[in-house]
Image (spheres, rainbow, N blue to C red):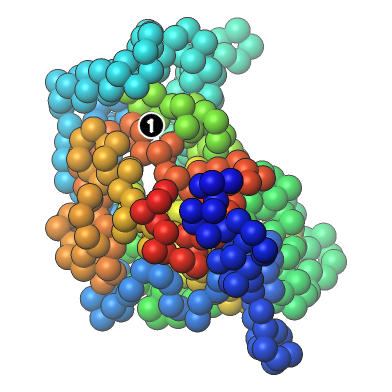
């Protein structure tokens, strides 16, 4: 209570917090506000369309090919990327990876007394077992080694031999659902707002969280890669259905709406991840994300529409579209910060659809402002990949894009270790009273940020 008094939050109406409760001055202002489809906390404010908290200069932004920041021999697609000729800034050697692992093991031992790396560098036998169990269908990939009828089968190789890809995920989705046309019934028809709520229901049923949308324009198209991660060109064209045949992907021009959705990863495990690589919290987040995506794409197909796009960074930078739609703010760590879940969001993915959708707005909950005075993630990074200084317009990474005032992460130094995600002060379980008050204060009174 003394701490609360020191912030001026104790007493009638919690002082500062009470003074910033959302209000509307007339019915027109109320009607003009975007329906709060995601039921955000009261301290989350909406901004004007196209105006996120990260300053943007569209004249500096252009469509670019996907560029791998780094590739090391432990990554399952290492050989595939090498064969494809996809651009990679840094090829990490086996010896360099061992040196990185040694740094991460030493850090884990210093942070968690008694911690041991175990057989794979993840921790004790239980943690190692959990991490291995989460590898099945991890990152949307067919397994290269699984038991079927008493035989160990390389499913990935079989799929490649049959003309498929190494992932069960794809731009067009599995296409297992019959369309309304195939069933001889009319497709779903709703208002843009009804459509978005229908998609939200589908996303949440399959394990997702929040949703956002807006109509695609020429500026937003600049956020789409020209070449995908494995070397296929990405184009927009006058085709009826998406073309997903290497070496080219064609997104139908009629898919002029961007749909975005999020999914969290396990909170407690995220806070306690340690070892040489992203742990089970991260990998299971990806696995669930890919599985939810393919189910969801067939759900939309069954409604009579297309939901087109890859997962993660396959279509464009994973954080770019969502900050315009209102799924969060861009953080110092360089990915999307959620007002409720912080950096424990594993999925903030975007797709293109021909289902009419409304424009949702960017949000402001004080996240970017807080990042300016925080820097905990940068301090925690043992490789100096996260920028500890001021945001900048300059882009020094070959894989990045200028045109926004933000913190650039040097992903050539990032071995995808489990550290930064768990450090963000915005990570909090729902209902944590002090966290809710702190977040409300951060969003409205940044002068208090140094207290936290």
Residue 397 in view of the camera: yes
Can you say whether 325 is above or below 442 in the image?
below
**Label 1's element?**
loop
In the picture, measured across the screen, residue 199 lies left or right of residue 282, that is right
Give 394 or 215, whichever is nearer the viewer: 394
Can you say whether 350 is above or below 359 in the image?
above
Residue most extreme to the right: 185
Looking at the image, which residue is at 52% across and 28% down?
269
* Residue at image mark 1: 418
Looking at the image, which residue is at 64% across and 74% down?
22
In which quadrant of the rendered view does residue 108 lie?
top left
Give how far across and how far down residue 245 sits, in percent. 44, 54
Can you say whether 366 is above or below 311 in the image?
below
Give how far across and how far down residue 167 sits, in percent. 48, 39
Looking at the image, which residue is at 30% across and 18% down?
110
Give how far across and how far down residue 263 sits, in percent. 58, 47
Give 245 or 424, whichever is nearer the viewer: 424
Task: Estimate how packed mark 1 is, as few (under 14), some (14 to 19) or many (20 or more) residues with alpha carbons within 10 Å.
Answer: many
Looking at the image, which residue is at 23% across and 76% down?
60
In the picture, measured across the screen, residue 226 lies left or right of residue 173, that is left
Residue 260 in view of the camera: no
In which quadrant of the rendered view does residue 390 lie?
bottom left
Give how far across and how far down residue 384 sits, in percent. 20, 40
Give 158 or 346, whichever is nearer the viewer: 346
Can you say whether 183 is above or below 93 in the image?
below
Count of marks overlaid on the render: 1
């Amino acid at each position: 209570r003394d701490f609360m008094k020191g912030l001026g939050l104790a007493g009638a109406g919690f002082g500062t917090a009470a003074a910033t409760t959302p209000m509307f001055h007339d019915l027109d202002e109320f009607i003009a506000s975007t329906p709060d489809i995601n039921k955000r906390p009261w301290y989350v404010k909406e901004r004007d369309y196209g105006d996120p908290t990260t300053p943007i200069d569209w004249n500096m932004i252009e469509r670019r090919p996907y560029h791998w920041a780094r590739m090391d021999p432990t990554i399952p697609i290492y050989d595939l990327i090498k064969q494809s000729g996809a651009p990679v800034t840094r090829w990490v050697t086996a010896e360099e990876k061992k040196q990185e692992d040694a740094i991460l093991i030493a850090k884990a031992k210093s942070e968690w007394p008694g911690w041991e790396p175990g057989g794979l560098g993840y921790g004790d036998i239980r943690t190692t077992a959990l991490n291995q169990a989460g590898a099945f269908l991890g990152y949307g990939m067919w397994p290269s080694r699984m038991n079927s009828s008493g035989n160990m089968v390389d499913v990935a190789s079989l799929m490649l031999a049959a003309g498929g890809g190494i992932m069960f995920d794809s731009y067009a989705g599995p296409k297992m659902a019959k369309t309304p046309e195939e069933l001889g019934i009319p497709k779903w028809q709703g208002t843009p707002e009804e459509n978005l709520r229908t998609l939200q229901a589908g996303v949440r049923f399959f394990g997702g969280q929040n949703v956002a949308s807006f109509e695609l324009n020429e500026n937003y198209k600049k956020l789409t890669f020209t070449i995908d991660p494995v070397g296929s060109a990405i184009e927009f064209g006058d085709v009826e259905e998406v073309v997903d045949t290497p070496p080219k992907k064609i997104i139908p021009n009629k898919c002029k709406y961007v749909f975005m959705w999020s999914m969290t990863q396990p909170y407690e495990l995220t806070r306690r991840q340690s070892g040489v690589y992203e742990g089970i919290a991260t990998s299971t987040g990806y696995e669930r994300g890919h599985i939810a995506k393919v189910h969801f794409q067939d759900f939309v197909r069954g409604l009579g529409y297309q939901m087109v796009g890859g997962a993660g960074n396959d279509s464009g930078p994973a954080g770019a579209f969502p900050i315009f739609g209102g799924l969060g703010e861009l953080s110092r760590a360089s990915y999307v910060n959620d007002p409720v879940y912080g950096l424990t969001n594993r999925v903030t993915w975007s797709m293109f659809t021909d289902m009419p959708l409304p424009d949702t707005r960017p949000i402001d909950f004080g996240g970017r402002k807080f990042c300016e005075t925080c820097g905990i993630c940068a301090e925690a990074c043992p490789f100096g990949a996260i920028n500890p200084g001021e945001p900048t317009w300059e882009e020094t990474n070959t894989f990045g894009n200028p045109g926004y005032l933000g913190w650039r992460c040097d992903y050539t130094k990032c071995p995808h270790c489990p550290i930064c995600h768990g450090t963000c002060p915005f990570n909090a379980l729902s209902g944590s009273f002090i966290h809710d008050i702190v977040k409300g204060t951060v969003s409205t009174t940044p002068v208090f940020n140094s207290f936290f």
